[in-house]
Image (cartoon, rainbow, N blue to C red):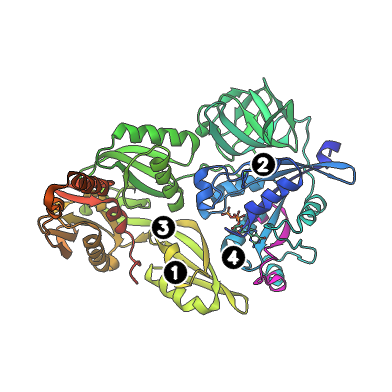
Amino acid sequence: MTDRQKNIRNFSIIAHIDHGKSTLADRLIEKTGMLTEREMDSQVLDSMALEKERGITIKLKAVRLVHERDGEEYILNLIDTPGHVDFNYEVSRSLAACEGALLVVDSTQGVEAQTLANVYLAMDQDLEMVPVINKIDLPSARVDEVKKEIEDIVALDTEHAPLISAKNGVGIDDVLDAIIDEIPAPTGDANAPLKALIFDSIYDSYRGVVCYVRIFDGKVKAGDRIKMWATEKEFEVVEVGVNANGSIPLKELSAGDVGYITASIKNVKEARVGDTIYDPANPPKEALPGYKKVVPMVYSGIYPAEGESYTDVRDALEKLQVNDAALVFDAETSVALGFGFRCGFLGLLHMEIIQERLEREFDLDIITTAPSVIYRVHTVDGKMEEIQNPSNLPDPTAIEYMEEPFVRAEIMSPTDYVGTIMELCQERRGRYISMDYLEETRVVITYELPLNEVIYDFFDALKSKTRGYASYDYELIGYEQGDLVKMDILINGELVDAFSLIVHKEKAYERGRKICERLTGVIPRHQFAVPIQAAIGSKIIARETIRAVRKDVLAKCYGGDISRKRKLLEKQKEGKKRMRSIGNVEVPQEAFLAVLKYDEDK
Ligand SMILES: Nc1nc2c(ncn2[C@@H]2O[C@H](COP(=O)(O)OP(=O)(O)OP(=O)(O)O)[C@@H](O)[C@H]2O)c(=O)[nH]1
């Protein structure tokens, strides 16, 4: 280990959502005196506006903190991680860039499922974990209990765990001491050939892609040729540096360092998270471990709403994709909605983020169809096809059998809700695996469930049935054969392909009935009666009717006050947004998602 490496610490903060990760990061940044209070834009790490509003960390980045203790200067590289199960792969790559992690636990909440999921990810990387107990300023803090919980569940010694209030800046020095004393310094040979891990990459319109890297071996500087292991693309380095108060270019980065590299890279797909950067003149025998091309789990259609242009939506998706290697899309057409796109996402949160960015950053009105998982369809001629869009399902007579993706879900909850949770999982075709008591009043319940039963509103249902006390995490475990059928929805006698979905046969009747009921609630009344039907093949399994209404908005305006008339017309126009007409029926955006929600009115 070089003298330089001796004073470097590379660490992450892992925590359940809202346990105070960003707040602690801000305090550490303040304490190390890198930014003045005026410069601190309340939460330095959460940079995207959307992220701020939602209070979740979406994209990870690294910040270099310089801290002096007993006359020694330490470089503390804080690597931020996203806190949601959709982004687990990114979390695992950023952890791979570290030697240690602070495990922040809210002392009023204790250990939660996402905390555990992150702890396991950190353990996989052999990270040194330092427990930090936060929010001790709150009267409801249960410091001793939570300490015991961490010891029992996570098996970490909490005797010297810093007790802090990130909000009030209490105990921050203890955290800095713990980082220096407990987390090991990086090792690695600065004179060996270059090996660097990309743990994040973002697109910047001025510099192209900025790769956030951890150098494991060797050195890298401006002018060097570099090559990416997985994508096999070669570039010339334009700049290397670190993120401190903004980007600070440096002469070089060497083994043990965390920083960024820019190299006129045009698309994040060429600098994928998890890939290894090396010197093409001196290739290593193997890449750094753990590279995985992230694949979308959930697909949905994105269509321009009435009056929006297809090319605007395509341009916007292309722009988003430059910045988001996990987003995939292809053109598709729907009989009901016309030209649009089939988009793949990591999960529902990722889908919502993309949808919101299209609406806010690009000012587009779009229609998102119900999300679907990927089904494997085995046909009688012995072939297997992956289907992302239910309306592409082959004719039933051509299908031998179908398989659907399954996940293993770990639900952590107080014991009071065990019955409710089991009922919910059972309802969603779950298979009970185990229940483990973490302590007297808390359990982890493990179920295997079909992914299509959890992607939509499982999380909301779980939260509402357990009054917010349960938390959960899931991972894909594989495909299983299922008795699946395609259900179509007809509106005013017309089959609307964008509504078609694949359901389990046993559930088809109930689902069909609920969907028809729900659609009658969200599709506005027209001047004629609109029948809504659910069908399997040619067999109608449910039917509802939206009664006719005579709607003449101007009839209210006796006297002909023109400005009032205009106002009403404007209002009616507003109300038209995010609508699509199907035949002569106007269908609002909610209808497309209503198809999948089935727990709402309980
Ligand atoms: N009372 C109190 N509140 C705190 C403390 N630390 C954080 N909070 C509050 O807890 C909430 C969540 O804090 P964040 O720092 O945004 O949590 P986070 O873990 O970064 O959340 P994500 O970015 O969503 O993962 C905010 O409202 C903070 O103000 C603390 O020590 N005491």
Q: Quadrant of the N terminus?
A: top right
Instruction: Name the residue nearer the viewer: 403 or 29.
Output: 29
At mark 2, the secondary structure is: loop
Badge 4 residue CB within 8 Å of ligand 1: no
- Image quadrant of residue 8? top right
How far apart are the two marked residues, 1 and 2, measured between alpha carbons? 40 Å
- Three-letter code for the amino acid on which mark 4 is drawn: Glu
Which amino acid, by three-letter code, is at mark 2?
A: Arg
Which residue was labeled with disc 1?
A: 464
Q: Earlier in the sequence, mark 2 or mark 3?
A: 2
Left or right for 149, reference 496 = right
Could you tell me how far apart the alpha carbons at marks 3 and 1 are, in whole angstroms? Answer: 16 Å
Q: Is mark 3 within 8 Å of ligand 1?
A: no
- Helix, strand or loop at label 3? It is loop
The numbered mark at residue 455 is 3
Q: Magenta residues, as a range?
A: 123-146
Q: The residue tagged with tag 1: helix, strand or loop?
A: helix
**Mark 3 is on which residue type?**
Ile
**Pointer 3 local density, CA inside 10 Å: few below 14, some 14–19, many at least 20:** some
* Residue matched to label 4: 112
- Indicate the position of residue 39 as horizontal and vertical percent values: 66, 40
**Local crowd size for mark 1, using a 10 Å CA cut-off: few (<14), some (14–19), many (≥20):** few
First reached walking from the N terminus: tag 3 or tag 4: 4
N-terminal of the two: label 1 or label 4? 4
Q: Earlier in the sequence, mark 3 or mark 1?
A: 3
